[in-house]
Image (cartoon, rainbow, N blue to C red):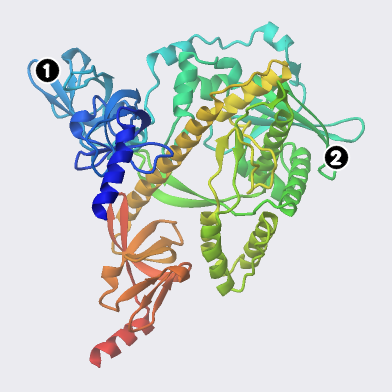
């Protein structure tokens, strides 16, 4: 029987012999490679001698080799796209040549560095090196030293390493910088003539205190008919970044800015991000705007989309705007209070129509001059944040709605929608069963009813012990939002049409949206067959950026907790697995693992998946997700970005334990 199956597999594989597929190369620690091809059931095995010049994470063309066997085997015939070209490692210097040895868990070749490309690096220096070329047939790649790292500053090297590992280069290519340097700072008079001039209308920005790249500004005035004109003005990056030039290619490659606790890795060079396109106060700026006429009931009566020239009169931080909202006084208080009132009405309507109200908390690190964390601040979304959020959502929604109506040759115009699918039933059902244990009922008869049940649950659980766990688990049942030309709507926001239009300084999809929208306004819209691939790339880069931000935050948490090893904290169980449970400290939101091994002295525990808990074999003691526990910080490993906690027994549990020992 087994032989027959084998021969069937061989026959099936032999039909693929010689075929070429595109996929990503995943190299294991042992040095064996696997190419992951979309929509193919099995990966293609690649032996180390068949990598050509490919490295881990590269997109490659792979040809199926002969030989049959249990799985497809292939060889790389072309490297289509490098995941990364910059690496951190050490220089090994001899009299006539140098090598660069990368820090890497995956096997990779040393780079040959010509002495002229050492950039003053000495033997043993830790550096960032760039792959310059690797010709077919060459044993080693040729590289150059980009930066020498400060041996004393481990934090800097760690942040750079996290970025590079995810394929985010630290520097812009020279040709991209050259294009950026040639962009004139002065706005040409003929460009101003082409645009709606809104410079004389009260306009301001509201942003985080440490922001430098101001993407968006709000204008406000009352029209003669008593209706409010509210303008959402967005930096017109697409005016400065022309399609397919070196600057555009570098921005597309990154597809997003990455925000780390102590730095920003920007999508566009700093002069564009923070100067040319940033909507700084008291400067004329080119913008792309959505201008709405809105009545007191927060109903949009009319809207206009197009290019503008604006002038910001004032820059507010969120804290300043919040103070005005709370106290009712300050610069332009009347306008900010009216905008807040309208934004809150939009918000209320949105939730009434099925948007899901997950609250968000942001962890910010207080850093010293070296970038070391000296404190952690937990920021919550307040009305000043919601004011901006609601107006940005409004602009994004109306732009997407507008473009969705356009037809080219009787076909829908491809457009980078931001979509969010309905919850996955497999994840939803266990969550509903778990929520029921706390008395929360769910109506799963339709996606709308599910959304309504979620909102009711979030409202009812607010302030209760289970709030945090239900929010966390609820978010996990949700699909991931992504960019695609297939418009299925945005479930979480309750919108039928949605896109990203409001942050082109830091997101490439917004630049794509601006370009297509301008083509629509000019009646020049054409069908772009490559748009879906671009959407996929942007979604992938967004996920990579989120992983980077998570890893960098984790590094800072571990760094912070190193100062507190041996100390005890209150925490909440944030996850459970067979090998232990994770605890997030209440004061600092630092997550660490309490391993099952550390509990053996108390009891043996088994994992009950449906209950999200561990249960003691003898004691019946439960560690359930959402439970409050006391922990002690046992270890903080920066290299692994890992925190180990041990559970601290209450006096009652200590007594129970000692009674058992006496028995």
Sequence-wise, the earlier of marks 2 and 1 is: 1
Q: Residue at x 28, y 89 (%)?
A: 660
**Residue 259 sits above or below residue 282 on the image:** below
295 vs 461, left or right, is: right
Quadrant location of residue 498?
top right
Q: Is residue 308 left or right of residue 211?
A: right
| Tag of residue 97 | 1
Query: Image point 77% across, 48% down: which residue?
Result: 345
Asked whether residue 147 is in view, the answer is: no
Choose top left, top right, bottom left or bottom right for residue 314: top right
**Quadrant of the snapshot with the N terminus:** bottom left
Residue 41 position, x and y percent, is 38, 43
Q: Nearer the viewer, residue 443 or 592?
A: 443
Of residue 440 and residue 651, the one placed in the foreground of this image is 440
Q: Quadrant of the C terminus?
A: bottom left
- Image: 608 above or below 59: below
* Image position, residue 52 (x, y; %): 23, 25
Residue 42 in the image: x percent, y percent? 35, 43
Residue occupying image coordinates x 46% and y 62%: 586
- Report helix, strand or loop for mark 1: loop
Tag 2 residue:
295
Q: Which residue is painted at 24% across and 19% down in the image?
A: 134
**Residue 628 visible at all:** yes
- Give residue 440's position: percent from left, percent from top: 62, 70
* Quarter-of-image position of residue 546: top left
The 10 Å Cα crowd at callout 2, few under 14, some 14 to 19, many 20 or more, is: some
Q: Nearer the viewer, residue 485 or 578?
A: 485
Please, which residue is most extreme toward the left here?
95
How far apart are the alpha carbons under marks 2 and 1?
73 Å
The vertical placement of 75 against 611, above or below, is above
């Amino acid at each position: 029987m087994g032989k027959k199956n084998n021969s069937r597999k061989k026959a099936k594989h032999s039909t693929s012999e010689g075929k070429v597929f595109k996929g990503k190369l995943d190299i294991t620690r042992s040095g064996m490679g696997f190419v992951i091809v979309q929509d193919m059931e099995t990966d293609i095995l690649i032996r180390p001698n068949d990598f050509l010049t490919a490295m881990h994470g590269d997109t490659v063309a792979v040809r199926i080799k002969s030989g049959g066997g249990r799985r497809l085997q292939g060889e790389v015939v072309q490297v289509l796209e490098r995941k990364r070209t910059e690496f951190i490692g050490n220089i090994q210097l001899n009299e006539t040549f140098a090598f660069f040895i990368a820090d890497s868990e995956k096997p990779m070749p040393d780079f040959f560095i010509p002495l002229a490309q050492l950039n003053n690096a000495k033997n043993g220096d830790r550096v960032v090196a760039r792959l310059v070329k690797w010709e077919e047939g060459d044993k080693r790649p040729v590289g150059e030293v980009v930066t020498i790292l400060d041996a004393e500053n481990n934090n800097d090297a760690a942040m750079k390493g996290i970025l590079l590992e995810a394929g985010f280069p630290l520097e812009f290519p020279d040709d991209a910088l050259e294009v950026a340097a040639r962009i004139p700072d002065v706005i040409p008079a003929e460009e101003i003539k082409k645009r709606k001039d809104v410079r004389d209308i009260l306009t301001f920005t509201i942003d985080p205190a440490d922001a430098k790249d101001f993407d968006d500004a709000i204008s406000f005035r009352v029209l003669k008919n008593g209706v409010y004109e509210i303008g959402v003005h967005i930096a017109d990056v697409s005016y400065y970044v022309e399609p397919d030039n070196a600057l555009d290619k570098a921005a597309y490659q990154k597809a997003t800015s990455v925000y780390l606790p102590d730095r920003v890795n920007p999508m566009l060079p700093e002069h564009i991000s923070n100067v040319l396109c940033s909507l700084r106060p008291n400067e004329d700026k080119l913008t792309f705007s959505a201008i709405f006429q809105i009545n007191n009931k927060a109903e949009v009566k009319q809207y206009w989309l197009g290019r503008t020239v604006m002038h910001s009169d004032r820059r507010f931080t969120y804290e300043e705007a919040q103070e005005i909202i709370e106290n009712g006084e300050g610069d332009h208080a009347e306008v900010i209070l009216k905008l807040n009132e309208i934004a809150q009405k939009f918000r209320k309507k949105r939730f009434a129509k099925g948007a899901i109200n997950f609250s968000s908390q942001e962890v910010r690190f207080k850093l010293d001059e070296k970038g070391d964390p000296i404190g952690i601040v937990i920021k919550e979304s307040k009305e000043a944040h919601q004011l901006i959020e609601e107006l940005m959502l409004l602009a994004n929604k109306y732009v997407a709605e507008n473009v969705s109506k356009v037809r080219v040759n009787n076909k829908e115009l491809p457009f980078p929608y931001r979509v969010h699918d309905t919850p996955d039933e497999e994840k939803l059902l266990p969550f509903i069963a778990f929520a029921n244990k706390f008395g929360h009922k769910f109506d799963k008869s339709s996606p709308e009813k599910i959304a309504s049940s979620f909102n009711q649950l979030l409202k009812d659980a607010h302030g209760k012990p289970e709030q945090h766990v239900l929010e966390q688990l609820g978010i996990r049942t949700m699909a991931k939002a992504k960019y695609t030309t297939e418009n299925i709507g945005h479930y979480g926001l309750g919108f039928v049409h949605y896109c990203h239009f409001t942050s082109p300084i830091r997101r490439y999809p917004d630049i794509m949206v601006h370009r297509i929208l301008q083509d629509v306004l000019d009646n020049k819209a054409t069908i772009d067959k490559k748009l879906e691939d671009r959407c996929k790339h942007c979604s992938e880069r967004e996920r990579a950026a989120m992983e980077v931000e998570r890893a960098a935050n984790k590094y800072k948490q571990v760094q912070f907790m190193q100062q507190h090893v041996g100390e005890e904290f209150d925490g909440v169980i944030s996850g459970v697995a067979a090998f232990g449970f994770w605890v997030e400290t209440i004061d600092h939101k630092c997550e660490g693992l309490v391993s099952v091994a550390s509990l053996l002295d108390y009891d043996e525990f088994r994992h009950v998946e449906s209950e999200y808990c561990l249960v003691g074999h003898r004691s019946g003691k439960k560690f359930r997700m959402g439970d409050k526990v006391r922990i002690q910080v046992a270890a903080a490993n920066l290299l692994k970005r890992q925190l180990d906690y041990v559970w601290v027994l209450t006096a009652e549990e200590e007594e129970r334990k000692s009674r058992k020992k006496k028995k």
